[in-house]
Image (cartoon, rainbow, N blue to C red):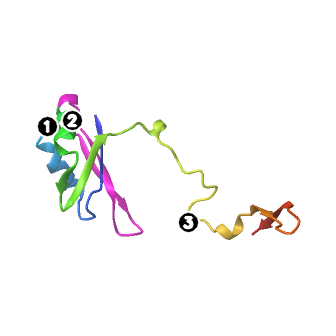
């Protein structure tokens, strides 16, 4: 079972996560998601445990417990196709000035609506 762990301390690394979950059974993989630009973890990670009973027990025992000074949340990970994604037309790192946006403006004096293109 793939397990999602959120609200991890930025100090937690893969081996810490593995050690925490090995108390409940065999861990196939442990991965803390790392933000290379920021230079620390993104505060969440994934554990894969082959035995469903062991992973269910780990989730039940570790969810909403304190680990490395933070209250962590532990859930069964959702498959990728169930996730929702931002509907932003550009990524946060793209140059927003290149994208045109249209704003609807109401003229207070005439009560008319018109669209203005902005760049």
Task: State the SS at label 1.
Answer: loop
Tags 1 and 2 touching, CB below 8 Å? yes
Q: Residues within 10 Å of mark 3 (few under 14, many from 20)?
A: few
Residue farthest to the right?
A: 110
Residue 47 against residue 72 in the figure, above or below? above
What segment is highlighted magenta in the picture?
26-53
Q: Check if residue 31 falls in the magenta segment.
A: yes
Structural distance between the alpha carbons of marks 1 and 3: 41 Å
Q: Quadrant of the C terminus?
A: bottom right
Tell me where residue 43 appears, x and y as whole percent: 32, 58
Foreground residue among 103 and 79: 103
Task: State the SS at label 2.
Answer: helix
Foreground residue among 1 and 102: 102
Q: Is residue 94 left or right of residue 42?
A: right
Tags 3 and 2 touching, CB below 8 Å? no
Structural distance between the alpha carbons of marks 1 and 2: 8 Å
Q: Check if residue 101 falls in the magenta segment.
A: no
Task: State the SS at label 3.
Answer: loop
Q: Would you say residue 27 is visible in this rendering?
A: no
Residue at horizontal 83 percent and vertical 66 percent from the top: 107
Residue at horizontal 39 percent and vertical 38 percent from the top: 78
**Quarter of the rendering containing residue 114:** bottom right
Task: Tell me which numbered mark, 1 or 2, is placed earlier along the sequence.
Answer: 1
- The residue that label 3 is drawn on is 93
Q: Residues within 10 Å of mark 1 (few under 14, many from 20)?
A: some
Residue 113 against residue 83 in the figure, above or below? below
Tell me where residue 11 appears, x and y as whole percent: 24, 65
Foreground residue among 27 and 68: 68
**Residue 25 circle label:** 1
Tell me where residue 34 appears, x and y as whole percent: 35, 60
Tell me where residue 93 appears, x and y as whole percent: 55, 65
- The residue that label 2 is drawn on is 55
């Amino acid at each position: 079972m793939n397990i999602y762990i959120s609200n991890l301390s930025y100090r937690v690394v893969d081996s810490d996560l593995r050690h925490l979950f090995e108390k409940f059974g065999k861990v196939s993989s442990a991965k803390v998601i790392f933000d290379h630009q920021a230079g620390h973890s993104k505060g969440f990670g994934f554990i894969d445990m082959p035995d469903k009973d062991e992973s269910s027990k780990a989730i039940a025992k570790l969810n909403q417990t304190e680990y490395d000074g933070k209250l962590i949340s532990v859930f069964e990970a959702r498959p990728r196709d169930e996730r929702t994604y931002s509907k932003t037309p550009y990524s946060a790192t793209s140059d927003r000035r290149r994208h045109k946006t249209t704003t609807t403006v109401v003229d207070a004096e005439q009560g008319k609506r018109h669209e203005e293109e902005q760049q």
